[in-house]
């Protein structure tokens, strides 16, 4: 014990780092023999770097900084834009966002071609009112370039206290110069379901903005009300829907597909998990609207309807986010968001980075006032189903 007390602070730090990494590696690999014999050089380099950083680096590091940096490096080795180490403030904000309300500008973002890309602005949010659009690439936030920035870091920079301002710079396809938007943050209440009858028709219109725990109940309420109003066919609008909770999406899909598979979850190890609809779908002529802002759980619902022959997809190819993230709570308020599986449609199609291709491609030109995709959906239902029914 006296020997340890006599050691220099630097040596104690290095020994602590060594102990930490051996604990991690023992947990992963399982046996000391495998670690020491098979990974001797790698472990040696790890410990040498830790020692050099503590002893010789011009910029001093605390033990917490050293460990945080090591964790970020391990997660970064995955080269997965959706897996990230969450510092306490980021993890706290993610938890708030998952609860359904938060202070920010109202933008759903993803990673496309390694760029922070707007999936969709939230309806009525500062971002939508300012003119930010699906497909815009966020190149800077308050002057900080986003190249190489993690998705969660970008979200963290855009969030903040209600009433404060943030400058978001975007690149828009077809526009030569970057566009700058100065947005005032406010509390964002995430909407979920809107519905109405299409004027002058027997067609119901149901828009799902995202999937959370309220969505299945609200969808059931909407369908019940639309039926009371005489609905004989339905347009399900999943455009600019960034996804959300998987369980909620599967339960919601059950209103549109019969009993059976909605999505397969393909894990790295073990058997696939299948999530199924319980049955009791509406069994009405159905058109589903999708676009490049339809992502993740929205793609699962659209893919299930397409694969199981329950409706016609109209619009443009979806975003292409077909991977599952699990969030793990760590010590000191930190967290880890890790890609743990991928989604497969009922036909076992991998949609990640590919998206779901609609049956009928209809592009919505920028600046076009008339909703051409909705117009096509109405035309398909009236021509194929409702006229024939008299």
Image (cartoon, grey):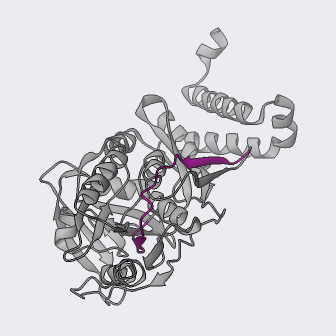
Point 41% across, 52% down: residue: 244
Could you say where residue 98 lies in the image, as x and y percent from the top left? Answer: 36, 44
Q: Is residue 36 left or right of residue 300?
A: right
Could you say where residue 322 lies in the image, as x and y percent from the top left? Answer: 55, 61
Could you say where residue 375 lies in the image, as x and y percent from the top left? Answer: 30, 83
The segment highlighted magenta reads 271-294
Q: Is residue 136 magenta?
A: no
Point 39% across, 66% down: residue: 146
Instruction: In the rendered view, tell whether residue 226 sits above or below residue 271.
Output: below
Closest to the observer: 253 or 351?
Answer: 253
Could you say where residue 99 lies in the image, as x and y percent from the top left? Answer: 32, 41
Number of numbered callouts drawn: 0
Q: Is residue 286 magenta?
A: yes
Q: Extreme top residue here?
A: 1
Instruction: In the rendered view, tell whether residue 390 sits above or below residue 282.
Output: below
Closest to the observer: 308 or 105?
Answer: 308
Quadrant housing the C terminus? bottom left
Closest to the observer: 118 or 224?
Answer: 224
Closest to the observer: 38 or 349?
Answer: 349
Quadrant housing the N terminus? top right
Point 49% across, 50% down: residue: 250
Q: Is residue 90 left or right of residue 306?
A: left
């Amino acid at each position: 014990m006296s020997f340890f007390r006599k050691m220099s602070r630097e040596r104690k730090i290095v020994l602590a780092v060594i102990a930490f990494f051996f604990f991690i590696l023992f947990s992963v690999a399982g046996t000391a023999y495998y670690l020491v014999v098979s990974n001797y050089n790698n472990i040696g380099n790890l410990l040498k770097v830790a020692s050099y950083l503590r002893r010789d680096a011009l910029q001093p590091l605390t033990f917490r900084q050293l460990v945080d940096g090591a964790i970020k490096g391990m997660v970064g080795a995955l080269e997965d834009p959706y897996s990230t180490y969450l510092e306490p403030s980021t993890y706290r904000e993610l938890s708030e966002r998952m609860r359904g309300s938060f202070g920010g500008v109202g933008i759903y973002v993803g990673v496309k071609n390694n760029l922070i890309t707007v999936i969709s602005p939230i309806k009525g949010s500062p971002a939508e009112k300012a003119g930010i659009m699906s497909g815009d690439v966020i190149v800077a936030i308050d002057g900080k370039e986003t190249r190489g920035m993690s998705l969660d870091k970008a979200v963290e920079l855009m969030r903040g206290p209600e009433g404060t301002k943030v400058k978001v710079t975007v690149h828009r396809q077809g526009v030569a110069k970057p566009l700058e938007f100065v947005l005032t943050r406010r509390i964002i209440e995430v909407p979920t379901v809107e519905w109405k009858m299409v004027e002058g028709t027997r067609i119901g219109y149901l828009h799902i903005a995202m999937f959370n725990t309220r969505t299945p109940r609200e969808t059931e309420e909407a369908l019940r009300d639309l039926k009371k109003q005489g609905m004989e066919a339905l347009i399900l609008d999943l455009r600019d829907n960034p996804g959300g909770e998987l369980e909620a999406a599967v339960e919601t899909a059950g209103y549109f597909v019969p009993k059976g598979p909605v999505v397969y979850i393909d894990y790295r190890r073990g058997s696939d998990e299948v999530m199924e609809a319980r049955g009791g779908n509406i069994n009405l002529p159905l058109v589903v609207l999708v676009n490049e802002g339809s992502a993740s759980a929205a793609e699962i619902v659209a893919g299930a309807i397409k694969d199981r022959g329950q409706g016609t997809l109209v619009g443009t190819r979806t975003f292409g986010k077909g991977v599952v993230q699990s969030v793990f709570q760590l010590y000191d308020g930190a967290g880890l968001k890790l890609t743990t599986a991928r989604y497969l449609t009922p036909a076992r199609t991998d949609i990640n980075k590919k998206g779901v291709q609609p049956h009928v491609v209809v592009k919505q030109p920028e600046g076009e006032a008339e909703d051409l995709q909705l117009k096509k959906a109405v035309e398909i239902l009236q021509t194929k189903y409702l006229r024939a029914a008299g």
